[in-house]
Amino acid sequence: MLLPVLALTSPATAQNDEILNWEKQAETACNTYDFKGFFEAFLRSDKVRAKYSASQIYQVRDGVSEPIAGSAYRDFPLGMLDYSWVTAESVRKNATGVPPPYEYVELEINVAGDRRARVDWVRMGYKNGSPDEGGEGDDRTGAYGKPGYLLFYPTDACWELVQDTQGGDAPGPMR
């Protein structure tokens, strides 16, 4: 009796393949001027964030701007779990096995004619704890916390993160 041969992939290899996929998605999005595709890869991969961050990022907290070397910037505020926008803290909690609820965010992405992009975000509450549960209708309970926005400037090859603003002059998504 012949037994099927199982292909075994180590977690490290699977993780490396995933990282390469996000890098490829970012590159493809850059080549087609697809900011939303680029932004998803930017959120999902530390390596993509490092590659597409400016050499100096302005971090603005409650109206106070502080320039930080792109290589030292560690406070990126957003992430994704499955297909939901969440806070970076929620991604960290999920990775360490902390169960939901997580902090979901609502985004508004605007790309100007000159390819500058701004992503406004705000934490959003939901009656059932997440936007995926609850069935029909709008189950949002409203925005909470300090909103923020991210600025990306175009480069010859793509975009790069140049500013992360939270609180102060951060109005959150437009309605």
Image (tube, rainbow, N blue to C red):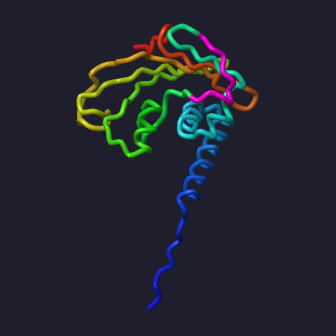
Instruction: Specify whether 42 is left or right of 94.
Output: right
Q: Which residues are magenta?
A: 65-74
Instruction: Specify whether 54 is left or right of 126.
Output: right
- x and y percentages locating residue 110 in the rendered image: 54, 20
Instruction: Specify whether 104 is left or right of 20.
Output: left
Residue at the outermost bottom position: 1
Asked if the magenta segment contains residue 93, the reply would be no
| Position of the C terminus by quadrant | top left
Residue shown at 53% from the left, 71% from the top? 7
Residue shown at 23% from the left, 35% from the top? 134
Location of residue 167 with respect to 15 vertically, above or below:
above
Q: Nearer the viewer, residue 78 or 37?
A: 78
Q: Nearer the viewer, residue 21 or 47?
A: 47
Instruction: Specify whether 29 is left or right of 61.
Output: right
- x and y percentages locating residue 60 in the rendered image: 56, 14
| Position of the N terminus by quadrant | bottom left
The image quarter in which residue 141 lies: top left
Residue at the outermost right position: 156
Residue 13 seen in the current view: yes
The image quarter in which residue 85 lies: top left
Residue 138 seen in the current view: no
Location of residue 69 with respect to 37 vertically, above or below:
above
- x and y percentages locating residue 151 in the rendered image: 59, 19
